[in-house]
Image (cartoon, rainbow, N blue to C red):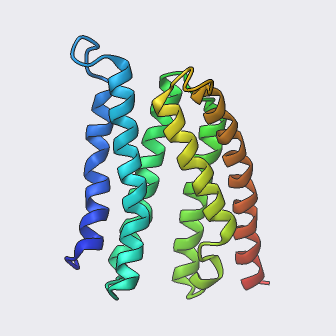
Amino acid sequence: MPRNIPILLTWMRILLIPFFTVLFYLPQTWLPIHIVNIVAASIFAIASITDWLDGYLARKWNQTSDFGAFLDPVADKLMVAVALILLVKLDRTYAILSMIIIGREITISALREWMAKKGKDKSVAVAYIGKLKTTAQMIAILLLLLNFKNFFGINFAELGNLLMFVAAILTIWSMFYYLKMAWQEFK
């Protein structure tokens, strides 16, 4: 296993998940929910930033590796899945939207693994539509974690769920895009 800053950032994302999760199970006498929301959103924001940063640094410093290429999306998908499950449990978003997003992540991860075994992994490399999906999803999750009802007239829960709907549409669109690209390789 390579040891470098990009890999350490990826491991940090994975290690943040239990702390992120435990926040929502602490007694409210320990931390009021609005503080839990802010701390959880901060942890998620750090994880989101390091998701971008570790890839950027790995490319810039020429420290890419097969292990990093494997671990990075795993860390990302674990954090997103845990956040979505917690948001559904907290009744802050719709289960169907979370199921669409998590289901797509599992499907595309499996597709990428299968395509890599066939030596065709470049055909399902991250596309622009996937980046749009990720951006909408990350912003939606942050807003839903913060859960501010009136932040200068903005209801974060409503805006977050609107973005979750957009993310779900982009999720389906990007899934079909990747499946189409994979299908073209085997026609």
> In what quadrant of the picture does the C terminus appear?
bottom right
The residue under the point 67% across, 48% down is 167
Q: Is residue 59 above or below residue 74?
A: below
The residue under the point 32% across, 55% down is 13
- The residue furthest right is 187
The residue under the point 54% across, 64% down is 109
- The quarter of the picture where residue 44 lies is top left
> In what quadrant of the picture does the N terminus appear?
bottom left
- How many labels were placed on the picture? 0
Q: Is residue 97 above or below residue 155?
A: below
Q: Position of residue 9 (x, y in %)?
A: 28, 64
Residue 187 located left or right of residue 94: right
Q: Position of residue 127 (x, y in %)?
A: 65, 72
Residue 52 located left or right of residue 167: left
- The quarter of the picture where residue 154 lies is top right
Q: Position of residue 129 (x, y in %)?
A: 69, 65
The residue under the point 41% across, 75% down is 56
Q: Is residue 170 above or below residue 40?
A: below
Q: Position of residue 6 (x, y in %)?
A: 30, 72
- The quarter of the picture where residue 37 lies is top left
- The residue furthest front is 152
- Inspect this view and state whether residue 186 appears: no
Most foreground residue, 1 or 42: 42
Residue 118 located left or right of residue 5: right
- Inspect this view and state whether residue 157 appears: yes
